Image (cartoon, rainbow, N blue to C red):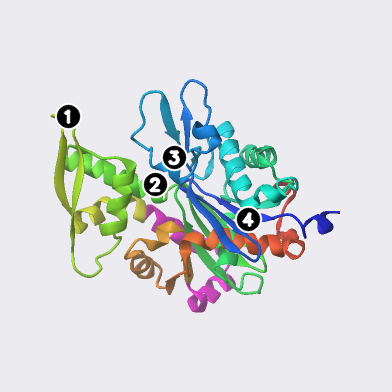
């Protein structure tokens, strides 16, 4: 019956991220890429605009809401922190992709999850997806989805190493023969880079800035190592002493210094994973190198830092932001072949 229904349902792969949620559909590629943000009324937890204040609409409200409204990011460190809001967000995204004409037929869904999540956290994802309208849910570990999306030969008897730096977690894994051989899930990622910039502005300039401003600084002048000419950026925020709006200028050099702690944590996780690898797998990586995926892979100079630390070739996957979402869609297409990589906790 499932095989008959799959020809009619809009089956989808979902990269349920701390910062962004991406949805990929078989044969269509990425069909949705929106922030994982929901705007609700504080007293009732009801989603605004008849359940439509999700994604881009809600992100515009971050840090700008009146007392009666709050913009919530329902995932923290890659896992669900607010079950009810996550369910509302997933329902909205599934409805948006599924379309009205096929809403009577529930889709099969593959959702990527951090490799280090607990059984309770897995159950929360299953329950959210089911109540949001999924006919059947499969969970795919993020490093596996990233490897599939990056086109790595992970099913072959050779080592492939992927470092997926998302918003809430960094997944470092060595894969071989279609499964994860060594893996580490680190709850330090893009959000921590933003937080490091916010803290730097507080300490150095007594200037309070919001998440969106911090993210803009990271994207425009942030780096992990010196790359090209040093640049500056005007930053606006609220003076912590006078309480008044103020503008200041920051340099790429000082932002690089501010980002050192989270960048070092990621490098250390890569080193620990390499140290735990079997000698034959480690030998393969001399030729195969390391592939970076996720939004954090776009941080300038990160490949240089990792190459210097490991001595291995480091490359960024094609379109790293969509790597995991594309991987979940390919996983869904080949579900019968890849089912062997699922344990019972990953299917429901």
> Which mark is first along the chain, 3 or 1?
3
- Front: mark 2 or 1: 1
Q: Which residue is mark 3?
A: 58
Residue 280, magenta (yes or no): yes
> Which mark is first along the chain, 2 or 3?
3
Q: Which residue is mark 4?
A: 13
Q: Is residue 310 above or below residue 50?
A: below
Helix, strand or loop: magenta stretch: helix
> Which mark is first along the chain, 4 or 1?
4
Badge 1 crowding class, 10 Å Cα cut-off, few under 14, some 14 to 19, many 20 or more, is few
> Which mark is first along the chain, 2 or 4?
4
Quarter holding residue 95:
top right
Mark pair 1, 3: CA separation: 26 Å
Q: Which residue is mark 2?
A: 191
Apparent side of residue 342 relative to residue 213 in the rendered image (left or right): right
Mark pair 4, 2: CA separation: 23 Å
Residue lying farthest front?
A: 101
Residue at left 37%, top 46%?
Answer: 192
Q: Secondary structure at mark 4?
A: strand
Residue 168 at x, y percent in the picture: 46, 47
> Which mark is first along the chain, 1 or 2?
2
Badge 2 crowding class, 10 Å Cα cut-off, few under 14, some 14 to 19, many 20 or more, is many
Magenta-tinted stretch: 264-289
Q: Which residue is mark 1?
A: 243
Q: Secondary structure at mark 1?
A: loop
Which image quarter is the N terminus in?
A: bottom right
Mark pair 2, 1: CA separation: 26 Å
Residue 67 at x, y percent in the picture: 37, 23
Mark pair 3, 2: CA separation: 18 Å
Q: Secondary structure at mark 2?
A: helix
In this figure, what is the number of numbered marks?
Answer: 4
Residue 315 visible to the viewer: yes
């Amino acid at each position: 019956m499932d095989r008959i229904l799959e020809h009619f349902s809009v089956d989808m792969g979902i990269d349920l991220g701390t910062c962004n949620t991406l949805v990929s559909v078989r044969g269509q590629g990425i069909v949705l890429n929106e922030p994982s943000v929901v705007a609700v009324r504080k007293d009732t937890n009801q989603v605004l605009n008849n359940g439509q204040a999700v994604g881009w609409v809600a992100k515009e409200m971050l840090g700008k809401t009146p007392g009666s409204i709050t913009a919530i990011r329902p995932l923290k460190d890659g896992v669900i922190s607010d079950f009810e809001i996550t369910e509302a967000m997933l329902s909205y995204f599934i409805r948006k992709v599924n379309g009205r004409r096929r809403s009577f037929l529930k889709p099969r869904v593959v959702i990527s999850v951090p490799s280090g999540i607990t059984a309770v956290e897995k159950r929360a994802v299953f329950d959210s997806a089911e109540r949001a309208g999924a006919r059947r849910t499969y969970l795919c570990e993020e490093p596996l989805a990233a490897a599939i999306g990056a086109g790595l030969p992970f099913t072959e008897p050779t080592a492939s190493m992927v470092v997926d730096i998302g918003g809430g977690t960094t997944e470092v894994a060595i894969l071989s023969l279609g499964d994860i051989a060594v893996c580490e899930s680190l709850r330090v990622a893009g959000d921590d880079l933003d937080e490091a910039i916010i803290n730097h502005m507080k300490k150095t300039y007594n200037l309070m800035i919001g998440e969106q401003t911090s993210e803009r600084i990271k994207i425009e002048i942030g780096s992990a190592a010196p790359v090209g000419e040093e640049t500056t950026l005007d930053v606006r925020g609220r003076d912590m002493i006078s309480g008044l709006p103020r503008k200041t200028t920051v340099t790429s050099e000082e932002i690089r210094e501010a980002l050192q702690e989270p960048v070092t944590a990621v490098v250390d996780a890569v080193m620990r994973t390499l140290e735990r690898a079997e000698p034959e797998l480690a030998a393969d990586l001399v030729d195969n190198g390391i592939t970076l995926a996720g939004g954090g892979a776009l941080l300038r100079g990160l490949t240089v830092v990792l190459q210097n630390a490991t001595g291995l070739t480091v490359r960024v996957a094609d379109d790293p932001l969509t790597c995991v979402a594309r991987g979940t869609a390919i996983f869904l297409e080949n579900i019968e072949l890849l089912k062997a990589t699922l344990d019972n906790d990953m299917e429901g």
